[in-house]
Image (cartoon, grey):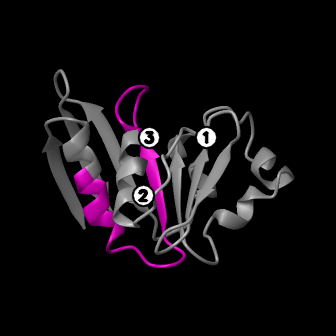
Amino acid sequence: MERVVITEGPEETMELAADLARRLRDGDVVALVGPLGTGKTTFVKGLARGLFIPEEVLSPSFLLARTYLGTKPLHHLDLYRLRHPGELREVGLDELLPPERGVTAVEWADRFPDLIPKGAVWVFLEHAGQNRRKVTIRR
């Protein structure tokens, strides 16, 4: 399945993600790909909205991971700062791919695609004008 949507700003990007979140099941992984500033963290904020997470979602760049609690836990990983995939195992985060419970969103998933389980939802974000984004969702 592939779906391509042009969003007109961060709010529409979050609504698209919230709609996706409502369809996700325990163990699902959402792999996010796109250059800096294309809205990967914004998309994760939308996933949180769809999972009724009241906390503000922050980029986990320096922590590698954050977990938020809602209707399902949302595990938010960021692979940008990893130098090799073994680092994820070293800090025990590989167990979130896939998670036993909840959903895992992985920013910069294309850096180590072998870490992403088969059946993951891949989300590609591209600049499409000022605040516009082209969002391609593949499962």
Numbered tag placed on residue 133 in the rendering: none
Determine the CA span between mark 2 and mark 3: 10 Å
The local crowd at label 1, few if under 14, some if 14 to 19, many if 20 or more residues have their Cα within 10 Å, is some
Residue on which the image places disc 2: 48
First reached walking from the N terminus: tag 2 or tag 3: 3
Residue found farthest to the right: 90
- Magenta run includes residue 107: no
Residue 84 image point, x, y percent = 75, 39
User: Of the residues shown, which amino acid type is indicated by label 2?
Assistant: Ala
First reached walking from the N terminus: tag 1 or tag 2: 2
Secondary structure of residue under mark 1:
loop
Identity of the residue drawn at 25% across and 45% down: 13
Magenta span of residues: 15-41
Residue on which the image places disc 1: 60
The local crowd at label 2, few if under 14, some if 14 to 19, many if 20 or more residues have their Cα within 10 Å, is many
User: Of the residues shown, which amino acid type is indicated by label 1?
Assistant: Pro
Residue 15 image point, x, y percent = 23, 53
